[in-house]
Amino acid sequence: MDTTTLIYCALALAAGCFVQSTVGFGMAIVAAPIIYFFEPKFVPGVITLVGFFLALFNMWQYRHMLSFKGLTAAFVGRVPGTIVAGILLMYITSESLALVLGIGVLLAVVISLTKVRIRPTPKALFWAGFASGVMGTTTSIGGPPMALVLQHAEAGKLRANLAGYFAFSCVLSLVALSATGHFSWWHFKYGIMLLPASLISTWFAYRVQHLIKAEWVRYALLILCSVSGVLAMWQGLSPLMA
């Protein structure tokens, strides 16, 4: 592996981890397109591994505001979502899935901008967890469904609960990726090599996150969700445009 490629990938992950540690999610949205350009084999396995460690650190940082009880329905929904994603990857291309999921995310953002309020009920969290399982396992970007449901929560609780959910979901995604041949010792090795830069940026995010206003967090969530939807659609359409 070329050293320059590793440096660019490390910087991309560092930027993504900074965003996720301040807003609540967004690491894969920022990092995945850049990393895919330099080393496609890092997506989604290496990104998911770094995301797991990032979630653990954010859980610890915001542990006093973490509520696993409120996330139970999302955890339950994540399991079948991951299984469905693993099965779909054996029969249809990830590009086709990305196109459908991207459209779905953009529609959810449009709904969020209206007066309709998506309440974090157990049913809503279940389906958000399910959608996140499918989207995260196939594209490595699984945050938007959960972020849209939790967008009206207080900023600290939003970060804490998303971190708790991501830690659980990353484990499931890594298991599914391993079972389908998309995660191996090679991915683990490079994920660990890229981790230090991500942890440094996360530490810096903790030092400045108190400067970010709550309403900024929600706007950032909607922007990141919109970006993720567009990126997913682009991923799905790119083979047709080649």
Image: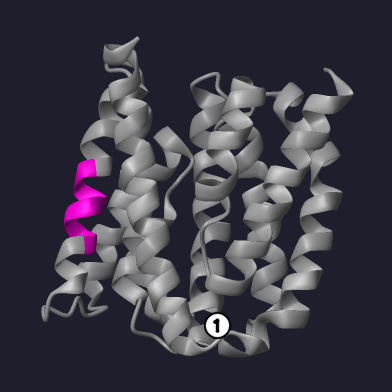
Taking the image as drawn, is residue 82 in sight? no
Residue at numbered disc 1: 66
Type of secondary structure dominating the magenta stretch: helix
Relative image position of residue 55 (x, y in whole percent)? 63, 62
Relative image position of residue 150 (x, y in whole percent)? 35, 76
Residue 71 drawn above or below residue 132: below
Q: Quadrant of the C terminus?
A: top left
Between 214 and 189, the residue placed more toward the observer is 214
Q: Dot 1 lies on which element?
A: loop
Q: Which residues are magenta?
A: 103-109
Q: Residue at x 69, y 47 (%)?
A: 13
Q: Which residue is most to the top?
A: 242
Q: Residue at x 32, y 18 (%)?
A: 93
Q: Quadrant of the N terminus?
A: top right
Instruction: Specify few, some or many for label 1: CA neighbours under 10 Å numbering under 14, 14-19, or 20 or more.
Output: many
Left or right: where 71 falls relative to 43? left
